Amino acid sequence: MVLAIGLRVTELAWHRSVAAYAFLKNMQTWIKICGTTSVYDALASIEAGADALGFIFAPSKRQITPAAAQEIIQQLPHEVEKIGVFMDAGAHNIAQVVEQVDLTGIQMHGEADFPPEVYGYVSVDRRDSMRKIKTVMVQEGFQDRLDALMPINGVVDAVLLDSGAGSGRTFDWNDARERLRDRSEKFIIAGGLSPENVGEAITIFHPWGVDVVSGVEESPGKKDHKKLKAFVAAVRKAESEL
């Protein structure tokens, strides 16, 4: 009887610890390391603590082919998100890449990739299980762009706020935060992030996620593994101080 009670207490403690871990993981800022071009850098990003990796299929110094991306993805842990990044690719082309690559999400830049059309082209067995991110450039009147996206339930899961595709520059975080004060969408901050400034971005925005490319690179397409670790550490430190 005593043994049974002891086992039950241990079991309850284990379930509580699992629940606590899940809760804390849920509260953590989602971290995406974008511009992945090699399995070596992909594994280093994961070891550093990335939640997601980005594979750029748009014209870029970091562009990767679907075949090369799939070769990398096949060697990665299942739980890590694999996000395909597209720029004005067209819904049909995006759907074709999704069929070739085991992506868990798509990130749409530009005007042509309007989410409902893309959603309609992706096969039924994939569309609802994939994370769907729409990029909005933080420019004058960007709130109107958000208003056009948000009523489309299930088609946009998160909005990535950026200063410009691959610009490496930040936007005015304080001004943007003021404009977004009453909104409840999942926002991902991108554009010019680095280990040195991501903590400030988190303090100002309390975002759902952050997305980094050039700020953790040695050169375009090649990651600096020390910067990867420093970036994730800076995110977690900023969270702990909120």
Image (cartoon, rainbow, N blue to C red):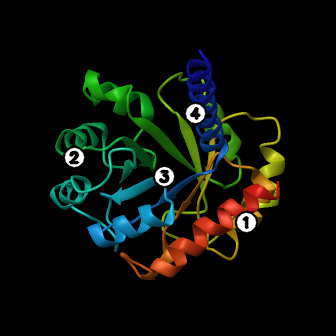
| Residue 117 or residue 75, whichever sits in front | 75
Say left or right for 174 vs 226.
Answer: right
Mark nearer the N terminus (2 vs 3):
3
Circle 4: element type: helix
Observer able to see residue 175: yes
Q: What residue type is labelled 3?
A: Asp
Tag of residue 199: 1
Q: Residue beneath label 4, please? A: 14
State the CA–CA distance, disc 4 to disc 2: 37 Å
Quadrant in which the C terminus is drawn: bottom right
Residue 102 in picture, x, y percent from top left:
25, 44
Q: Which amino acid does label 2 sit on?
A: Val
State the CA–CA distance, disc 2 to disc 1: 33 Å
Residue 132 in picture, x, y percent from top left:
45, 37
Observer able to see residue 38: no
Residue 178 sits above or below residue 184 on the image = below
4 vs 1, front mark: 4
Residue at 31% across / 65% down in the picture? 59
Mark nearer the N terminus (4 vs 2):
4
| Residue 164 or residue 39, whichever sits in front | 39
State the CA–CA distance, disc 2 to disc 3: 18 Å
Quadrant in which the N terminus is drawn: top right
Q: Residue beneath label 2, please? A: 101
Q: Residue beneath label 3, please? A: 51
Say left or right for 6 vs 204.
Answer: left
4 vs 2, front mark: 4
Q: Which amino acid does label 4 sit on?
A: Trp
Mark nearer the N terminus (4 vs 1):
4
Mark nearer the N terminus (3 vs 1):
3
Residue 61 in picture, x, y percent from top left:
34, 74
Residue 45 location, quadrant: bottom left
Residue at 42% across / 28% down in the picture? 116
